[in-house]
């Protein structure tokens, strides 16, 4: 490998420097039919799962074919997307917030040709490259985080559990037979870069063991006051520790106070939490962000722990499948998962979904906990 | 032949859903073959080593990535996240494997010319692996080495005219829903406002000076497709304040079964004949609609713009014409005191260039948070700590019932001295004249 200079001169970093230009302007990237009709759309229809038509005041139509993407994507794969977009869509394509890819054309014929083409493409391993679906009252792609592919604090993987879950829910991606749409998301630690806290179904990575203390290196690797300050429950204090016959500066952790958030590890690499038996998955359900009918709500913890069963997380995926099936069989049309659970009562939700209710599911964290206990004599047997 | 055996990951190649393992393998094979003769600036076998280290994580059930060191490009405090693996001898190709965040264009619309330029750059100067997109919205490039950072940035800005996104205690890359570009529900141009705010606040985005991260998200209507109400410190949600436009002929067409309700979203199951009473009128949360002699009537003053009726009958009902947005503040994930949903601060504001009114709210909030916020305190936590009233004071917004779900449950009102006639300075001698000790 020979180093190829971009033209950047390390001795004069400010020479010709371009900064603060922001993203490219969206106007450059609109397909012509979008540019011409922006702000003038009249209505839309979902023609079949994954295929939409939007109709403008001008009478113009745009057909959209929506396909799933693994959010982890190679440049080879992106180039294939470009090749499809060049062939059918005049060289334009977009992504949705939920990692789907949308191809737009102006005729129904080309939309269906595009769909057939996309569905014919498979990876060497056998999976679809571009399964079409993810619209309406079905289950669309999962928003998620990095996991073991690229982060330092995960308590589970992200891409693996997502793949395993969507394999199990695939029929619902290809269909629109749920009472309302079901949004699934995954975050691989409590930091929740993926903000899963308002999803119909949230898969959350969680540690269950307090940090291990690497006393030999802690003072060398970390700013002890920062590690102490990082702990939200004040479980960490500075401490002198006997190590290898010497007294070293380190920290002590009040383990019963630890909520396994991993903030200390982010500040101090000498306090790792990860553990093959300690780490696993929490399932939360019943959140939503839309203001439709009822207000936006947080997801609730309904399964306190499932171990990391690599490579396909069968307990996690089968539990999710069971919740989805029971919801689909019981909820009213338009009722989101959380709205259904609230209507029938959570006691009934646990019974119908055959989930065990354990003490872990009763909130005991600070003020908000009280508001989740039952303050009425009304309940179901 | 693959460089590392990956029997566990291989099991994620089967099944219908697109397999990230197959895709990484495809990239590894492409780099090994190198038909275009690219002089890869990071190890050609980086993707093989990604698979190797992932496999090890699948065996150990623990990550093998270490913390980021402080790496970045000159003059910016964000946009690059340092990443190193903890088994560099086994996987030298990913020993240094930093992430670069690139600010995605509005609505995540792309031309293939632009995407191909990005792909060429990332193939040359990185692993060839990306996230399309990161959860905040950026294009995320996974895996490069420190010497490549400035080179990448130079080519990104000079050749592609494109900048990095945010990370750390700064304004994170703003994101928007598709909005007016292709959605009939949009109450303002989300792309235009998102772009303007991103450009106007480039300094805040690239040079961390905040107590902690700060997110803007732009939703064109209360359906909240980008989850702004749950995920952004400042959430901009389109709304309107006049009447829902009704096309009575189209209402009849829905009742008569000519139009599919909910734009066909429920077509996969037989839910029976569309029943406007049951499916729309009875589900309206404010019960502000009814049928009157074959006509649908909406008492718009009582409507809270939940979108349900419009979502069910998009060809009959349209958002109003006096459009604008609501600003909600303080949403965040649970760390630490629990999750917070956005709280309504500004019920209605017109969205008009150059957006001065909106920027005034933003800057008042930032001034307060930068002055009073503790290290790593999100805006939502500051609002809780100092009180909603304090936020109204710093933004000069008058209190109104729209600000609360319900009035307070306790009478512990912190009266200010100037609100009480005569003030708080009193004479004990005067008091004692009438009240013995
Ligand atoms: S959720 Fe946690 S572990 Fe996952 S990518 Fe974000 S910070 Fe890393
Ligand atoms: S994991 Fe969180 S709660 Fe536990 S010691 Fe570390 S910072 Fe404190
Ligand atoms: S938030 Fe509203 S305007 Fe934006 S894409 Fe969703 S439905 Fe359309
Ligand atoms: S938008 Fe919601 S509140 Fe308003 S009339 Fe329609 S259903 Fe009722």
Image (cartoon, helix red, strand yellow):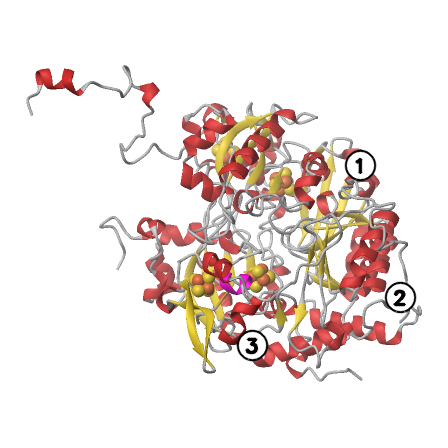
Q: Chain of mark 3?
A: B
CB contact under 8 Å: marks 2 and 3: no
On the same chain: label 2 and label 1? yes
x then y, percent, for residue A31: 82, 43
Q: Position of residue B228 (x, y in %)?
A: 57, 43
Separation (CA) of disc 1 from disc 3: 48 Å
Which residue shows up at 61% across the image and 25% down it? Answer: B357
Q: Which residue is mark 1?
A: A35
State left or right for residue A138 relative to residue A132. left
Magenta residue check for A281: no
In magenta, the rendered stretch is A263-267
Q: Secondary structure at mark 1?
A: helix
Query: B74 above or below B350?
Result: below
- The answer to whether residue B205 shows anywhere in this view is yes
Q: Residue at x 28, y 52 (%)?
A: A374
Q: Earlier in the sequence, mark 2 or mark 1?
A: 2
Q: Which residue is mark 3?
A: B61
Q: Residues within 10 Å of mark 2 (few under 14, many from 20)?
A: few
Percent coordinates x, y for residue B157 in the rendering: 83, 48
Chain bearing tag 2 is: A
Quadrant location, the C terminus of chain B: top left
Query: Residue A3's mark?
Result: 2
Local crowd size for mark 1, using a 10 Å CA cut-off: few (<14), some (14–19), many (≥20):
some
A266 within the magenta span: yes
Chain at tag 1: A
Quadrant of res B94: bottom right
Q: What's the CA distance linking mark 2 and mark 3?
A: 37 Å
């Amino acid at each position: 490998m020979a180093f190829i200079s971009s033209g950047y001169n390390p001795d004069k970093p400010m020479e010709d420097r371009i900064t603060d230009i922001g993203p490219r302007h969206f106007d450059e990237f609109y397909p012509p039919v979008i540019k011409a009709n922006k702000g003038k759309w009249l209505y839309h229809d979902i023609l079949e799962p994954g295929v939409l038509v939007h109709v403008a005041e001008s009478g113009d139509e745009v057909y959209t074919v929506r396909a799933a993407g693994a959010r982890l994507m190679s440049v080879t794969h992106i180039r294939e997307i470009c090749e499809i977009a060049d062939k059918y869509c005049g060289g334009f394509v977009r992504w949705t917030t939920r990692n789907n890819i949308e191809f737009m054309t102006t005729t129904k014929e080309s939309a269906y040709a595009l769909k057939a083409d996309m569905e014919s493409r498979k990876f060497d391993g056998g999976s679809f490259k571009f399964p079409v679906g993810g619209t309406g009252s079905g289950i669309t792609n999962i928003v998620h985080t990095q996991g073991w592919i690229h982060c330092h604090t995960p308590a589970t993987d992200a891409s693996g559990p997502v793949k395993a879950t969507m394999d199990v829910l695939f029929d619902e991606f290809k269909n629109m037979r749920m009472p309302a749409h079901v949004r699934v998301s995954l975050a691989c630690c409590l930091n929740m870069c993926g903000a899963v806290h308002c999803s119909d179904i949230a898969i959350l990575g969680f540690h269950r063991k307090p940090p291990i203390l690497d006393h030999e290196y802690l003072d060398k690797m970390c700013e002890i006051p920062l590690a102490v300050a990082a702990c939200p429950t004040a479980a960490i204090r500075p401490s002198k520790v006997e190590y290898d016959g010497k007294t070293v500066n380190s920290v002590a952790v009040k383990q019963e106070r630890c909520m396994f958030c991993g903030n200390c590890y982010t500040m101090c690499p000498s306090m790792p939490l990860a553990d093959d038996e300690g780490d696993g998955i929490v399932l939360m359900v019943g959140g939503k962000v839309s203001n439709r009918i009822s207000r936006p709500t947080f997801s609730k913890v309904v399964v306190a722990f499932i171990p990391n069963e690599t490579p396909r997380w069968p307990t996690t995926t089968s539990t999710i499948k069971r919740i989805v099936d029971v919801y689909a069989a019981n909820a009213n049309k338009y009722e989101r998962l959380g709205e259904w659970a609230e209507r029938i009562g959570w006691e009934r939700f646990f019974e119908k979904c055959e989930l065990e209710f354990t003490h872990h599911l009763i909130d005991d964290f600070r003020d908000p906990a009280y508001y989740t206990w039952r303050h009425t004599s009304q309940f179901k047997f | 032949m693959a460089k590392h055996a990956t029997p566990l990951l291989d099991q994620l190649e089967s099944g219908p859903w697109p397999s990230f393992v197959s895709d990484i393998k495809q990239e590894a094979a492409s780099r090994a073959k190198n038909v275009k003769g690219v002089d890869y600036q990071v190890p050609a076998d980086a993707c093989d080593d990604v698979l190797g280290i992932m496999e090890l994580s699948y065996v150990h059930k623990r990550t093998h990535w270490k913390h980021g060191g402080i790496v970045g490009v000159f003059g910016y405090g964000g946009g690059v996240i340092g990443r190193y693996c903890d088994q560099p001898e086994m996987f030298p190709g990913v020993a240094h494997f930093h992430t670069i965040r690139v600010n995605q264009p509005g609505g995540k619309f792309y031309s293939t010319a632009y995407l191909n330029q990005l792909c060429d750059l990332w193939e040359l100067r990185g692993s060839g692996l990306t996230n399309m997109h990161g959860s905040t919205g950026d294009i995320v490039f996974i895996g490069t080495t420190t010497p490549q950072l400035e080179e990448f940035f130079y080519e990104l800005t000079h050749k592609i005219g494109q900048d990095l996104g945010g990370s750390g205690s700064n304004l994170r890359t703003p994101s928007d829903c598709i909005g007016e570009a292709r959605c009939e529900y949009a109450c303002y141009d989300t792309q235009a406002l998102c772009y303007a705010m991103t450009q106007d606040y480039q300094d805040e985005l690239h040079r961390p000076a905040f107590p902690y991260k700060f997110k803007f998200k732009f939703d064109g209507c209360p359906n909240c497709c980008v989850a702004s109400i749950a995920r952004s410190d400042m959430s901009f949600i389109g709304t309107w304040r006049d009447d829902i436009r009704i096309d009575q002929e189209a209402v009849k067409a829905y009742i008569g079964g000519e139009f599919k309700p909910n734009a066909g979203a429920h077509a996969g199951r037989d839910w029976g004949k569309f029943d406007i009473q049951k499916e729309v009128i009875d589900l309206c949360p404010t019960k502000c609609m009814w049928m009157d002699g074959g006509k649908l009537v909406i008492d718009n003053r009582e409507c809270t713009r939940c979108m349900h009726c419009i979502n069910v009958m998009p060809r009959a009902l349209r958002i109003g014409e006096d459009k604008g947005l609501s600003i909600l503040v303080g949403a965040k994930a649970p760390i630490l005191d629990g999750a917070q949903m956005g709280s309504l601060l500004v019920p209605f504001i017109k969205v008009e260039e150059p957006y001065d009114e909106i920027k005034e709210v933003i800057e008042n909030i930032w001034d307060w948070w930068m002055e009073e916020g503790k290290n790593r305190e999100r805006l939502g936590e500051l609002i809780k700590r100092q009180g909603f009233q304090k936020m109204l004071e710093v933004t000069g917004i008058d209190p109104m019932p729209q600000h609360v779900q319900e009035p307070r449950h306790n009478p512990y009102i912190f009266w200010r001295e100037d609100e009480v006639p005569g003030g708080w300075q009193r004479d004990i001698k005067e008091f004692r004249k009438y009240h013995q000790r």
